[in-house]
Every structure is written in C-alpha cells, then in structure tokens.
Image (spheres, rainbow, N blue to C red):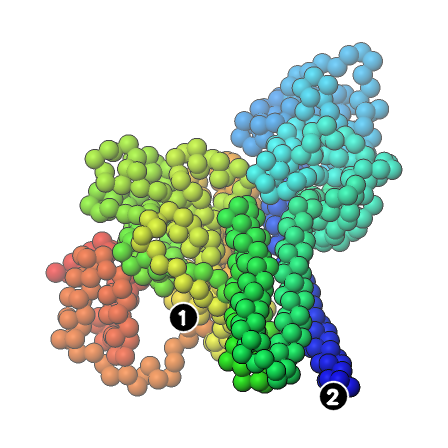
C-alpha cells in the first residue's frame, strides 16, 4: 500500500514539475516578448524625437547659412560686373558701404559688413581701416577663398574676443582671379538653437560640428571651439568617432555608466547637426517594469506549484474526508490571498507610474501592464475554481493559454482610452476650411458640440453669444490673428468666455514656441497636422471631469487604400499619411477634393499679393497653403511653403522672388495629378436632370443653411443633389455655391444667391 502511495506521489511530483516548467517557459516567453516590444517602441520614439529635433535644427541652420551665402553671391555678382566695366575704386567702396547697410538691415542683422581685397587694395563696407602691418592676402579669409576659386568658401568658426560670439567668415573669388569678397557673421542664432533644443526638453545635448570635427555650436557653450576629432576621451569624442558620410542616421552607445541615443543629420556643407538623448532613466523605468513583472509572475508560478501539489494530495487521501475538505477550503482561502498579493503589487506599481511618470510612453506601457495584470487575476480565479477541485479532476483545470496570450498581445499592441462628452461645447477658429473639417472629423466620436469660425472676428462674435468649455484658435489668420483674437476675448470681462481655456493651433513647431504662446496668454499648444491622440488628451485635461465618460478602444488596422488613390503612389502626395492626418479614408477624400478644387482660386490669390508686392498677406496665404498641403500628405511641397513663409517673416524678398515661380508651377501642377482621382464617372451622364422647381428648392435650402452657418446641412444638400445633373443655366451658380460652402464662406453663399435677384 505504501509502495503504491509512494509511486503515486512520485508521479504527482513529476507531473507538477513538468507543469511548472511549462508555465515558466510560457510566461517567460510572454515577459520577454512584451519587454522586447516595449523596449523597441521606446527606442523608436526616442529616435523619432531625435530625428525631428536634429532635422528641425538643420533646416534652420541651413536656411541661415544659405541666406549668408546668397548675400555673398549677390554682392560678388555685382562686383564682377563693376570690375569688368573698370569702375573706379571709390565707386566700389561706395557700393560696399551701401550694400553692407542694406543687407544688414533687411536680411542679416548679425552681419558685421562686407569687406575684401579688390583691385589690389583692402576695401571695407564699414570703412574700417586696418593697422599698417595688416596684410590682406595673408589672412585666412583670403587664402581659403583663393584655394576654392568660384565657390563660397567657409572658414573654421572662431570666438570673437571682444563680443564672445562665435563668428563665421565666408569668402568668394571675383572674376579677375585675384580679388576676394568676404563676409563675417555671428553664429549666435545657431548657438541659441542648440541651447533651446535642450531647454525645451527635446534633447539632452545638441551640437553642430563642421567637417573637421570642430564644434561650431553646442548646447554647452563652453564646448564651442573644441575639436572632437583630436580628443581622446569624452562624449564628444565617442560621438565623433561614429560619424559617417550618410545623410541621416542614428546610433546608440554607453559612456560612463549612461546610455545615449544619437541622431545625426548631414548638412549641405558637410557639417553635422547632432541631437543626443540620455536614455538611461527612460530605459531604467523599463528595467523596473521588467523586474516587477518577473517577480510577480515567478511568485505566482511558485505558489501555483505548491497549490497543485497539495491539492492533488488532498484528492488522493480517502480517510478523514470531511476534515481534509475543511483544511482544503482554508488552504484555498490562503492561496487566493497569496496569489493576489504579488499581482496587486504589480498593479499598484504600474498605477504609481501612470500617476507620477512624466514620460507619456512609460504611462502608456504601464496602462498596458495594468490591463494584462487584471487578466492575470482572472487567470488566478480560474485556477482556484473550487468546483473543479471538488469534482476531483485537477486535469480539468485547463487554461486556454493561447487565448490569454492573444489578449495580452492585444492589450500591448492596441488598447487605449478614448472618451465621450455629449454635454461639452467647443469653438474652433481657423481661416483654413480644410483644418476645420479635419478637426471635426478627428473628434466626431466624442459627441462634443463643435462650433466653427473662419476668422478672428467671427470667433469673437460666437464667444459673445455662447459659453464654451474650450476654445481652439489658429495663430496665423489674415486681418486678426489668433493672439489678437485671444487678447480681445480676455480683455472683455463681459464676454462669458474671458476665462475659458484657449489652446493655440499652429503649424510652426519651432523651438521655444510653447513658452512664447503661453507668454501670450494661451493655456496650451497643439501643432499641425493635429495628432488625434494628443488632441484627445488635451481636451480631456481641460474638460470638466463630470462631463467626460472614458472607455477603452482597440487599435484599428490600417484601412486599405481606395482604388482611385493608387494613381498617387510614388508621387508627391502620400495618401497614406494624408489618411492618417484626416483620421480615416472617409474624412480624407473630401479634404483632398477641397485641396484640388481650390487650386485655381488659391493660386490666383497668392499671385495677386505677389504682383502687388503685398508680402505680408502673401506670407499668410502661403502659411495656409502649407497647412493644407501637409494635411493631404504633400509633405515636400509643405516644406517649400514653410521656407517661403520663413522668408516672408524675415523680409527676405530675394528668396521669395527666386522661388515663387517654381513654387506656383508645382502647386498648379497638382491639378493635373488630382484630376485623375476626381475624374467624372461614366454614370454621371445617365443621371436625371434637376428641374427648375428642384433647383429653386436647393438654392432656398442652401440660403437657410448658410444663414444658420450649418455646414452639415449644406453637405447633406449637396450629397442629395449629386444624384442629379444640374442644368447648364444653373451649373455655374451651383458650382460657385458649392465651392463657397467647401470654404465655409456662408456670407459668400448668400451673396451669390442674391446676384440677379
């Protein structure tokens, strides 16, 4: 009898050991896979942030250097003409003085002035007279330019002893082969860019190296002038020895116990713009999460092994059954407590991370751990099902591990929180109708009441008659911009919204922008194209808690690209990015159509302002076009619009004149491309023609909807009418009304309808 009992116990031990080993392998695989996924996602986010920071800085620096280079080229072109026509030295001197003043006041404030060695003598645009021992042809600005004939040569930066500023000299040979024109500029703006990147939290170290490893600018100003190629130690040396000739790349390394991730952008003159992130604490949070998870799961497995062993022993004992059942019940009660304790510890720590962490990614990951932990509690309930034990069939305590695995993976990959707020009301003010359409589409599921206005004055009028929970204001608008609109609302204490949270919407995601807008009085800041998750999080943080109903949503699979959009593949418009910006294919198609149908009118406006030399309104219209281009996925065109906008703001009229024509050609070229997407269908010819009574009804309904500023009703009117052909006599008027509706121009609709009455 004892022998049989011993054999049974050995079988029990073997079976339980195998079960424990399988569970350890299973859960270890889940933990490692989950941690690997979190690690990769976190690293990708850091690299993406570094990419944005480095590329943004590189674009600004390239633009700054290009402006200086263009100034040298323009002046050298004029001087070449003066040399060829044998103009006198006094005329050349006068030109240098006039041009130095003009360039410094209109384009480059930090320029000290033009100077050079021309016609065998030193000439200065600031009328500086050098000391007697000054030999111009021995100076680096001259010798460096002579070593690179025909090019704009750039000297190594140097620190000016008097001002403390980092200076840069540019030089170019002139047509006689002996004369050189040069220009000194301060790099304090470039230095400020690197410092801002760190102070804004976008990087921990930001630097600019020339092709020789010399530090041109650095977030730590003390590093300026160092040569990292010549050093043998330090972070700068570790970074410099990993630099390559690639245009854009990233790498990570460990130094002095810290973990760094670096993103490098190679600039036009072979300089490197480098963004460095100290990822030590970020990955430290992941290690903490990994440790807590391993501890909790290990505890559960050990306790489960003990539980299964003891439970099976209970089942194999026939004597004193009642006493054993009581002992078993007591044991289950204790086991329930012991199993839940480590799981609750894991849930508690994840909750602490959610509440206290300042890293959005860590918060998201912790929410996923919380979801997985709750599922693990459900697993414990299954394992502790008393009815199965009392039935005497421990083998029946089967767990669908595949289902649990899938659920855990789903929570890690997709689940996030969204919300509804049916009683809330917001106002969105933007002069670009596409932006208003996108905004409404992105938050339509929240059931928030959304009012829209296409100008600052219209927005103010709405705030006087309605109380809003949040107001979103576009910054750059014609006539009255977002800052002026905000101040007018705030200063009118009879306005029911003088204390309402106001959030600025801007396409200018530049360094220091958040502080600038908060100083202007805005409560918060969102960049365009608007990120749907960031928009929801911002709204939730400002809406009253009692209005918000939170619910979980799972990740949506990417929608298949409609057949008509496949003609855009590999072209200048990335439809996939556009769909992501709009929120869905359904929302993207009307936006793309608005972009297509407004090309003629917008191009005409921009050309009129250009011809009238009204560069202020030209800049505003280019800004609006930039936003629309980015929304539909025309990223490169949007970047060119950004450069024109920057030039307009800086008063760089030469850049606008040099690039306006090519910019407009590219813009108008989109009409041919998009006509393939929106070409008339064959079925259109077979539609019945609308009679005069129907047309009169449509116009009457359109007037009523315009007077109520009801864009949804206008959209419904045009959708219903699309089933009919519009008679030729009314077609032009109908199309003008529809175009005005797409621009949210309600007054324009009424004006068109009043014509001829």
**What residue is drawn where x is 43% and y is 33%?**
519
Q: How far apart in space, not on screen, are marks 1 and 2 (Cα)?
A: 76 Å
For residue 356, side relative to residue 426 (left or right): right
Q: Residue at x 76, y 25 (%)?
A: 117
Which one is nearer the viewer's eye here, 242 or 349?
A: 349
Observer-nearest residue: 83 or 658?
658
Q: Earlier in the sequence, mark 1 or mark 2?
A: 2
Q: Which residue is at a point 67% across and 64% down the rendered structure image?
A: 298
Can you say which quadrant of the picture contains the C terminus? bottom left
User: Helix or strand or loop: what does disc 1 sit on?
Assistant: helix
> Marks 1 and 2: which is nearer the front?
2
Q: Is residue 467 left or right of residue 376?
A: left
Q: Which mark is residue 1?
A: 2
Q: Nearer the viewer, residue 106 or 5?
A: 5
Q: Is residue 340 above or below residue 541?
A: below
Query: Residue 732 at x, y = what percent?
Result: 26, 67
According to the picture, the residue beneath numbered tag 1 turns out to be 586
Residue plotted at (44% across, 70% down): 585
Q: Dot 1, how many residues are within 10 Å of its Cα: few (below 14), some (14-19), or many (20+)? A: few
């Amino acid at each position: 009898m004892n022998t049989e009992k011993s054999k049974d116990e050995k079988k029990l031990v073997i079976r339980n050991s195998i079960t424990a080993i399988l569970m350890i392998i299973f859960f270890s695989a889940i933990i490692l896979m989950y941690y690997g996924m979190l690690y990769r996602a976190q690293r990708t986010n850091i690299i993406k942030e570094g990419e944005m920071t480095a590329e943004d800085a590189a674009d600004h620096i390239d633009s700054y250097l290009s402006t200086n280079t263009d100034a040298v080229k323009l002046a050298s072109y004029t001087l070449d003409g003066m040399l060829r026509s044998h103009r006198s030295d006094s005329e050349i001197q006068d030109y240098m003085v006039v041009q130095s003043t003009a360039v410094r006041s209109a384009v480059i404030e930090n320029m000290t002035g033009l100077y050079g060695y021309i016609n065998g003598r030193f000439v200065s645009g600031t009328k500086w007279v050098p000391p007697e021992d000054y030999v111009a042809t021995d100076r680096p600005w001259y010798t460096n330019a002579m070593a690179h004939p025909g090019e704009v040569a750039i000297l190594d930066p140097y620190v000016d002893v008097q001002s403390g500023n980092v200076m840069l000299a540019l030089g170019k040979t002139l047509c006689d082969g002996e004369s050189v024109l040069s220009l000194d500029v301060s790099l304090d703006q470039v230095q400020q860019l690197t410092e801002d990147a760190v102070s804004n939290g976008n990087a921990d170290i930001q630097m600019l190296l020339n092709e020789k490893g010399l530090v041109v600018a650095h977030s730590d100003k003390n590093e300026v002038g160092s040569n990292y190629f010549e050093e043998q130690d330090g972070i700068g040396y570790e970074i410099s020895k990993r630099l390559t000739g690639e245009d854009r790349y990233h790498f990570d390394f460990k130094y002095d116990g810290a973990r760094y991730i670096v993103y490098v952008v190679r600039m036009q003159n072979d300089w490197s713009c480098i963004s460095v992130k100290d990822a030590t604490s970020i990955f430290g949070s992941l290690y903490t999460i990994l440790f807590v998870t391993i501890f909790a799961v290990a505890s559960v497995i050990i306790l489960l092994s003990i539980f299964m062993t003891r439970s099976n022993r209970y089942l194999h004992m026939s004597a004193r059954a009642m006493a054993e059942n009581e002992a078993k019940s007591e044991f289950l009660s204790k086991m329930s407590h012991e199993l839940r304790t480590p799981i609750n510890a894991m849930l508690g720590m994840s909750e602490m991370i959610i509440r206290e962490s300042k890293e959005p990614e860590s918060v998201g990951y912790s929410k996923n751990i919380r979801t997985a932990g709750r599922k693990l509690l459900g697993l414990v309930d299954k394992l502790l099902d008393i009815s199965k034990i009392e039935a005497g069939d421990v083998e029946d305590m089967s767990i669908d591990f595949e289902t649990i695995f899938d659920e855990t993976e789903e929570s890690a990959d997709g689940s996030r929180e969204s919300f509804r707020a049916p009683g809330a009301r917001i106002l969105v003010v933007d002069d670009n109708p596409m932006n208003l359409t996108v905004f409404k589409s992105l938050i339509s599921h929240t059931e928030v009441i959304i009012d829209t206005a296409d100008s600052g004055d219209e927005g103010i009028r709405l705030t006087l008659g309605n109380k809003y929970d949040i107001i979103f204001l576009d910054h750059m608008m014609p006539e009255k911009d977002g800052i002026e609109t905000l101040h007018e609302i705030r200063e009118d204490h009879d306005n029911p919204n003088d204390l309402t949270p106001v959030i600025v919407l801007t396409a200018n995601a530049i360094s220091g922008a958040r502080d600038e807008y908060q100083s202007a009085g805005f409560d918060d800041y969102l960049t365009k194209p608007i990120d749907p998750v960031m928009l929801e999080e911002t709204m939730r943080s400002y809406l009253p808690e009692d209005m918000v109903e939170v619910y979980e949503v799972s990740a949506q699979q990417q929608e298949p690209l409609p057949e008509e959009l496949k003609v855009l593949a590999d072209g200048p418009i990335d439809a996939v990015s556009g769909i992501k910006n709009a929120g869905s294919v359904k929302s993207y198609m009307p936006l793309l159509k608005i972009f297509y149908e407004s090309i003629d009118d917008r191009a005409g406006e921009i050309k009129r302002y250009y011809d009238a030399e009204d560069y202020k309104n030209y800049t505003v219209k280019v800004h609006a076009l930039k936003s629309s281009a980015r929304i539909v996925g025309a990223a490169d065109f949007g970047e060119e619009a950004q450069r024109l906008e920057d030039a307009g703001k800086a008063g760089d009229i030469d850049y606008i004149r040099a690039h306006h024509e090519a910019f407009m050609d590219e813009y108008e070229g989109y009409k041919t491309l998009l006509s393939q997407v929106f070409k008339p269908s064959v079925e259109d010819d077979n539609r019945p023609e609308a009679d005069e009574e129907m047309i009169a009804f449509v116009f009457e309904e359109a007037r009523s909807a315009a007077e109520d500023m009801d864009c949804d009703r206008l959209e419904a009117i045009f959708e219903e009418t699309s089933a009919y052909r519009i008679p030729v006599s009314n077609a032009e008027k109908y199309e003008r009304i529809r175009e005005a509706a797409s621009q949210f121009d309600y007054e324009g609709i009424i004006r068109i309808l009043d014509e001829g009455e």
